[in-house]
Amino acid sequence: GENVEQHPSTLSVQEGDSAVIKCTYSDSASNYFPWYKQELGKRPQLIIDIRSNVGEKKDQRIAVTLNKTAKHFSLHITETQPEDSAVYFCAAPRQAAGNKLTFGGGTRVLVKP
Amino acid sequence: GAVVSQHPSRVICKSGTSVKIECRSLDFQATTMFWYRQFPKKSLMLMATSNEGSKATYEQGVEKDKFLINHASLTLSTLTVTSAHPEDSSFYICSASPGTGGEQYFGPGTRLTVT
């Protein structure tokens, strides 16, 4: 099965700076990598995802990069704002052909004004 | 698009009683729904996978007789916590997947407190 490790577990940045969260996965057949943002007491929200046929995807201030050879993918948030403060989870498919996801342990991001 | 609702949002029940939680996909048909449990400041722990019209598959260590799952239609799955105990108190979240692409959309969660 898939094993997903996420680092760092906490990240504190100054408003306007960039934040980077990295995840590694174990199954080389994995082909879908979503990122979720969860605010306190709320649902995880899908903010961006990437499939294994591309190396980078960008949506305004957030981007995800994928390195299939090294089996890691990263979330990049630029020009951070206080509303970016939340817990972010990466995920990878439990198995290549299934819909189950294995989640990373989460990164608590605090953006200080 | 891809809206998932979950009810109730909060429930308090006495030990020994059962609680039903509903998960609905509002604007898409969900081939698969998932039930997760989340402890404070922890990640999402998959409990079971639910496919419409078939039996749910449970993760290792999850008691199927305690956590009954019914996926009656392509837009509705229910989780019933039977004979609840205080240790069942948790945040339960469902998600729904519209196809085979891997995307999952989460409901708002249900905070269960068993007294």
Image (cartoon, coloured by chain):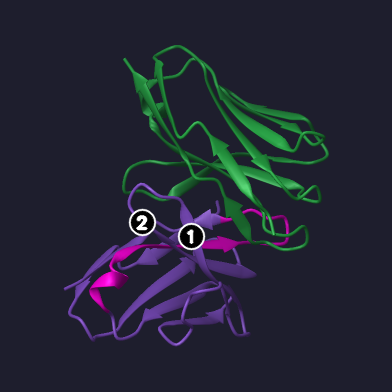
Colour seen for chain B? purple
* CA distance separating discs 1 and 2: 9 Å
Colour in which chain A is drawn:
green
What numbered label is drawn on residue B39? Answer: 2
Secondary structure under badge 1? strand
Identify which amino acid the numbered label 1 is placed on.
Met
Q: Please identify the quarter of the rendering in which residue A53 is found.
A: top right
Name the image quarter holding residue B108.
bottom left
Residue at the (64%, 53%) spot, across then down: B103
Residue B45, which numbered label?
Answer: 1
Marks 1 & 2, CB-CB < 8 Å contact: yes
Q: Residues within 10 Å of mark 2 (few under 14, many from 20)?
A: few
Please state the horizontal and vertical placement of residue B42, each as a whole percent of the image: 40, 50
Q: Chain of mark 2?
A: B
Q: Is residue A90 above or below residue B102?
A: above
Question: Which amino acid type is marked by label 2?
Answer: Phe
Residue A14's disc number: none
Q: Which residues are magenta?
A: B85-104
Front residue (pair B78, A1):
A1
Quarter holding the C terminus of chain B is bottom left
- How far across and how far down the image is residue A103, in percent? 56, 50
